[in-house]
Image (spheres, helix red, strand yellow):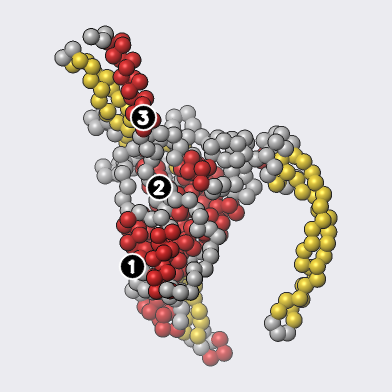
Amino acid sequence: MLDGHLLLGWLSLAVIVYLLSLPGPTAAYFGLTGNEPLSILPLNSLPEENVGRAHYKLCDRLKLEKKQRRMCRRDPGVAETLREAITMSALECQYQFRFERWNCTLEGRHRTNILKRGMRFVCFTLLRKDRKWLMTSHSKCAIPGFKETAFLYAISSAGLTHALAKACSAGRMERCTCDEAPDLENRKAWQWGGCGDNLKYANKFVKDFLGKRSNKDLRARVDTHNTNVGMKVIKAGVETTCKCHGVSGSCTVQTCWRQLLPFHEIGKQLKQRYETSIKVGSSTNEATGEGEISTGRSTQQQQQLQPLPGLNDQIPRTMDLLHIEDSPSFCRPSKYSSGTAARKCYKDKNCDAICCGRGHNTQSREVTRPCQCQVRWCCYVECKQCTQREEVYTCKG
């Protein structure tokens, strides 16, 4: 028979093998946070033939889950809206991080590793009972997630919500129309041609489309929280737009409708929340072995998040982005990014930060751009072509 030490060593090896075989976190939702490669970018128009079934093909190209694919096929306008949401989120992410070391790299390997940081670690306890060693799993340890992970989840859900609400008001969807708010002003707005963005339908669709995910580990709850932040930022940014009607602009009648902020403004707000993202940990419930999250609210149903001790005393709020692990430097090539070597930078703005202290190269080149443009009647713009020399700065390797 094996003695206790040998058996313990054998069990430890078995645990390691088991851990390596487990899949990564499954809380990948859609678009920038989905498992599928972003091969559908850039937007390409579909062939004109079989237009009635064209959205079926696009739904398949999006590589959605079974329920998502079913929802996609129900309305011909959904597929194009989903693709628009992915494109909008990707472009906004890259714009917001254009001066950062991590510039929202969306290549499959790097994006996947940002989303699936680490393996699914299951915590085990070895017990001796009736002269036998027993191995029992009692909880799931946290799977780390970076600030960048948090931003990807938030911008993805925000893009999906924004695109759907706009598609409804633009008449591109069969199952929704303008804002369905019951107040009189919105009815009048519809009568006069004003059409509010249908955030109510968009929120309902997104929640159903993303579905409920497992909340048994910290990473899953953090991902869900950050997804909700994206939707809440959209909701908080609703503005009332009004239009006057009357003789000679007298505004005897005024109609109003609700309108979302431009998505660029949403991206800006989420980038600010990324900068102030809160690092959280979890406490373990000894009775269940499951991690609990604390936001400082005493709700029994709400699992709560806690800031890690020694970092700050800030209590996470519902609109805060959350992360679990400090981000890597992104300076050198790794599984998270291609590094910053040869990255273009701006000498007086960000070369020192992006190049990680390695310095930068300077190249001079001639560029030709449109200049001295004038509007001609009717209706085109006429420009001259001007050549000038400019300096380009790139990070050293």
Of residue 334 and residue 257, the one placed in the foreground of this image is 334
Q: Which of the 4 quarters of the picture holds residue 5?
A: top left
Q: Residue at x 83, y 62 (%)?
A: 387
Quadrant of image for the N terminus: top left
Amino acid at dot 3? Leu
Location of residue 179 in the rendering, given as x and y in whole percent from the top left corner:
39, 72
370 up-or-down from 95: above or below: below
As helix, strand or loop, the secondary structure at mark 3 comes to: helix
| Tags 3 and 1 touching, CB below 8 Å | no
Location of residue 172 in the rendering, given as x and y in whole percent from the top left corner:
43, 73
Which residue is tagged 1?
Answer: 74
Quadrant of image for the C terminus: top right
> For the residues carrying marks 1 and 2, which lies nearer the camera in this image?
1
Amino acid at dot 2? Ala
Of the numbered discs 3 and 1, the one sitting upstream in the chain is 3
For disc 1, the neighbor class at 10 Å (few under 14, some 14 to 19, many from 20) is some
Location of residue 334 in the rendering, given as x and y in whole percent from the top left corner:
57, 35
